[in-house]
């Protein structure tokens, strides 16, 4: 057979050149210049040049048969002018199936292959042009989001400074209200002790005849009656027993009622001595001085509680804001706008929700929601007002991590430690960020049990491209 090929080469010298270079890219043509011998590209053997493309495999690397299917390790180069060039296994050469769009792989077979490279190239060029337009628009939108992110970052920094100043002011107020509450409680205690001390207590608190008269005058008609005395005056040594009618009349000087003037000459004198009768429940709330002290103490306690709550709220806001500002939002804060946002996608019977920098969830038609990472659903609040999740012990847990390539670490997010999977382990979600003119969750897949992958499209994922390669533009 080799003899026949050599004879054919002699009589068809014009055909030999084209046959010998078939299936070779331009970068490899230097190895196939016609000469007396051919060196296998792997350097393993030297053969006569006539044995190149003779349909017999001489080189171990198959480099002597680029245009035939003789070598099992051979490769045939499809030039595919107008489309993308590529290699196919040389075993597919002349097998009756069109693999190269320029039909060059079926040069000696009964297959009638059409050259479709131009049409394929047109379609792909149109697609690439569309992609480039999308990229240009995405980069324009990304620049806007970067500018908005910088402004938002500065606003959050200013907000943090304002909150810190508010916290300092509240700290001063807190100390003042604590002092006031302590003083009010001290005065209340002094008033109570003074009232319990009887006569001395009355004098120490500067209680006047008028204040005692008003205390006994229940109906505020300007006089004290027998019934009012029986209601509010008791014996010093027998507080449980009510005064009799006669005892009450005696305290009033024999009359059924007295005014303030007569009160000073009768009941007041008896009360100030403190040896026979006293005001009922002296330490109770009916005493105006004690009532005032009690109300003052309650007022200061209420005010202190309000300031304490405000101080605690501000400190929580400061803590949350610091944690939010500690997140890596990209080199230019371009991803900051994603915080406090959530994106949903329905796939079959499930609704998937991605809240960037927070968590990923899956909800079925029955309404059961499962965390796909991280797992803290019981303590997780809505995406609109939560930046971090709290563990049962009160510590904060971050959203996950960036897991892109060294050249672009912001191309992928990983959300780990989701709810436990029924086969063991926890659910994990990997989110790949792709360039687009809109921000949306595009696809969700579960390639393996409880391992989810998401395609998340957003303008901030767009990266400048220096040169688009891979398609011949020439005819």
Image (cartoon, rainbow, N blue to C red):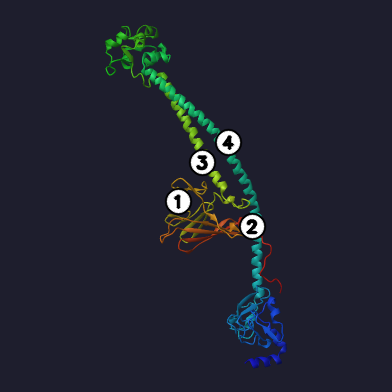
Q: CA distance from mark 4 to mark 1?
A: 34 Å
Q: Is residue 132 left or right of residue 449?
A: right
Q: Is residue 221 visible?
A: no
Which one is earlier in the sequence, the residue at label 2 or at label 1? Answer: 2
Label 4 or label 1, whichever lies nearer to me, is: 4
Which one is earlier in the sequence, the residue at label 4 or at label 1? Answer: 4
Q: Is residue 115 above or below residue 147?
A: below
Q: Is residue 218 above or below residue 400?
A: above
The secondary structure type at the circle numbered 2 is helix
The secondary structure type at the circle numbered 1 is helix
Which one is earlier in the sequence, the residue at label 3 or at label 4? Answer: 4
Q: Position of residue 382 (x, y in %)?
A: 49, 48
Q: CA distance from mark 2 to mark 1?
A: 34 Å
Q: Which mark is residue 316?
A: 3
Residue visible at 65% across and 87% down in the picture: 51
Residue topped by disc 1: 377
Cβ atoms under marks 2 and 1 closer than 8 Å: no
Residue topped by disc 4: 165
Residue topped by disc 2: 138
Q: Is residue 284 left or right of residue 37?
A: left
Which one is earlier in the sequence, the residue at label 3 or at label 1? Answer: 3
The secondary structure type at the circle numbered 4 is helix
Q: Position of residue 66 (x, y in %)?
A: 64, 81
Near mark 3 (Cα within 10 A), the count class, few <14, some 14-19 or many ≥20, is few
Image quadrant assignment for residue 54: bottom right
Which one is earlier in the sequence, the residue at label 2 or at label 3? Answer: 2
Q: Is residue 198 left or right of residue 473?
A: left
Label 2 or label 4, whichever lies nearer to me, is: 4
The secondary structure type at the circle numbered 3 is helix
Q: Is residue 473 visible?
A: yes
Q: CA distance from mark 2 to mark 4?
A: 40 Å
């Amino acid at each position: 057979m080799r003899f026949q090929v050599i004879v054919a080469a002699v009589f068809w010298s014009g055909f030999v050149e084209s046959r010998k270079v078939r299936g070779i890219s331009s970068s490899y043509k230097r190895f196939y210049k016609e000469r007396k011998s051919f060196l296998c590209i792997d350097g393993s053997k030297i053969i006569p040049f006539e044995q190149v493309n003779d349909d017999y495999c001489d080189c171990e690397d198959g480099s002597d048969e680029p245009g035939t299917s003789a070598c099992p390790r051979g490769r045939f180069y499809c030039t595919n002018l107008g489309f993308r060039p590529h290699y196919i296994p040389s075993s597919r050469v002349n097998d009756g199936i069109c693999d190269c769009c320029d039909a060059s792989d079926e040069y000696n077979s009964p297959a009638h292959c059409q050259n479709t490279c131009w049409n394929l190239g047109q379609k792909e060029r149109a697609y690439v042009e569309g992609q480039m337009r999308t990229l240009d628009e995405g980069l324009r939108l990304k620049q806007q989001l970067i500018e908005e992110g910088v402004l938002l970052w500065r606003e959050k920094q200013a907000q943090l400074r304002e909150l810190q100043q508010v916290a300092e002011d509240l700290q001063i107020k807190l100390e003042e209200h604590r002092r006031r509450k302590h003083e009010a409680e001290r005065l209340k205690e002094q008033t109570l002790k003074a009232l319990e001390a009887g006569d001395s207590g009355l004098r120490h608190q500067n209680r006047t005849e008028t204040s005692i008269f008003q205390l006994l005058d229940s109906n505020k008609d300007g006089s004290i009656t027998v019934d009012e005395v029986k209601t509010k005056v008791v014996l010093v040594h027998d507080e449980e027993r009510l005064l009799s009618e006669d005892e009450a009349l005696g305290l009033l000087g024999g009359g059924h009622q007295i005014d303030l003037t007569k009160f000073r000459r009768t009941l007041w004198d008896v009360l100030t001595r403190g040896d026979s009768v006293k005001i009922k429940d002296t330490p109770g709330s009916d005493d105006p001085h004690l009532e005032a002290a009690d109300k003052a103490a309650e007022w200061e306690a209420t005010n202190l509680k309000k300031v304490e709550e405000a101080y605690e709220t501000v400190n929580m806001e400061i803590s949350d804001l610091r944690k939010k500002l500690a997140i890596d939002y990209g080199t230019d804060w371009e991803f900051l706008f994603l915080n406090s946002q959530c994106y949903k996608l329905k796939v079959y019977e499930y609704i998937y929700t991605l809240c960037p920098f927070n968590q990923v969830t899956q909800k079925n038609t029955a309404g059961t929601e499962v965390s796909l990472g991280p797992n803290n659903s019981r303590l997780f609040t809505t995406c609109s007002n939560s930046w971090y999740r709290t563990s049962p012990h009160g510590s904060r847990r971050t959203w996950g991590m960036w897991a892109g390539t060294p050249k672009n670490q912001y191309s992928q997010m990983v959300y780990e430690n989701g709810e436990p999977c029924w086969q063991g382990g926890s659910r994990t979600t990997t989110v790949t960020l792709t360039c687009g003119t809109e921000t949306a969750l595009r696809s969700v897949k579960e390639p393996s049990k409880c391992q989810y992958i998401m395609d998340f499209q957003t303008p901030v994922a767009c990266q400048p491209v220096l040169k688009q390669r891979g398609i011949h533009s020439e005819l």
